[in-house]
Image (cartoon, rainbow, N blue to C red):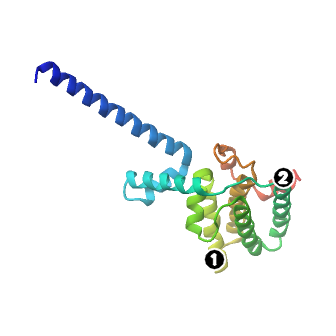
Amino acid sequence: MSTIVWIAVAVALILALAVGYVMLRQRRQGLRQRFGPEYEHALNEQDSRGQAEQDLRAREKRFATLDIRPLTPASRQTYAQRWAKLQERFVDAPGPAVTEADELVTAAMAERGYPTEDFQQQLADLSVVHGRTLHHYRQAHEISMRATSGEASTEDLRQAMVHYRALFEELLDDGDEHHPQPVEAREKEPTLQDDSQQR
């Protein structure tokens, strides 16, 4: 082969590697944008970046098979009213209110079409669209589990309500599962009193 052919082959190989690298970075950036903080959580849970990204893509494929749907306006209003009453009950019975908050969030998930039998699977399914608030749900669930054994303070229980509310509000949203709304405003922890003042 002539030198020109070798140069052409080398240039083609370099271009192919460059295109492959750019495509890999774009896929990685797309996952990071879609999953938000859940991307970093997946990295911490897996042995390698490749495994974490494979897991996230598998979540997206599974999510595509689910029949996720928005709540009807009437159902959304009913859930909002139930949440308002639940917050009022928190004052007198924080432990039972947190348990009921967990049940209410789970009921909203089920009505939206999310499978609710297994907590870890719930997290994986929710992460595709609600990755930016999923850490709230994890923390709320962890506090709720501690509360069942009497190891959660009233402040812990209040935090659980705040955390549950972050996901609950997203579940009650318009249901646009392909373009989740950013929740930077919700990162500021609201207090339960904020809600009572708004009513």
81, 6: nearer the viewer = 6
Q: Quadrant of the image for the N terminus?
A: top left
Residue depth check, mark 2 versus mark 1: number of the one nearer the observer: 2
Q: Which residue is mark 1?
A: 151
Q: Residue furthest right?
A: 199
Q: How many marks?
A: 2
Mark 1: secondary structure: loop
Q: CA distance from mark 2 to mark 1?
A: 38 Å
Visible in this render: residue 132? no
Where's residue 158, x and y in %?
72, 65
Dot 2: few (<14), some (14–19), or many (≥20) neighbours within 10 Å?
A: few
For this orientation, the residue located farthest to the top is: 4
Q: Is residue 71 above or below residue 88?
A: above
Mark 2, secondary structure of its residue:
helix
Residue 46, horizontal then vertical, whole percent: 41, 59
Are the residues flagged by discs 2 and 1 in contact, CB closer than 8 Å? no
Kindly give the residue lying farthest to the bottom in the view shown.
Answer: 149
Where's residue 21, x and y in %? 35, 36
The percent coordinates of residue 61 (x first, y second) are 52, 53
Task: Give me the residue at 83% from left, 73% from top.
Answer: 92
Residue 8 visible, this orientation:
yes
**Residue at 59%, 70% in the rendered image:** 118
Q: Which picture quadrant has residue 171?
A: bottom right
Residue highlighted by disc 2: 73
116 displayed left or right of 81: left
At label 2, the amino acid type is Pro
Q: Residues within 10 Å of mark 1 (few under 14, many from 20)?
A: few
**Could you say which is closer to the camera, residue 66 or residue 110?**
66
Give me the residue at 71% from left, 54% from top.
Answer: 69
| Residue lying farthest to the left in this orientation | 1
Residue under the point 31% across and 32% down: 16
Q: Amino acid at mark 1?
A: Glu
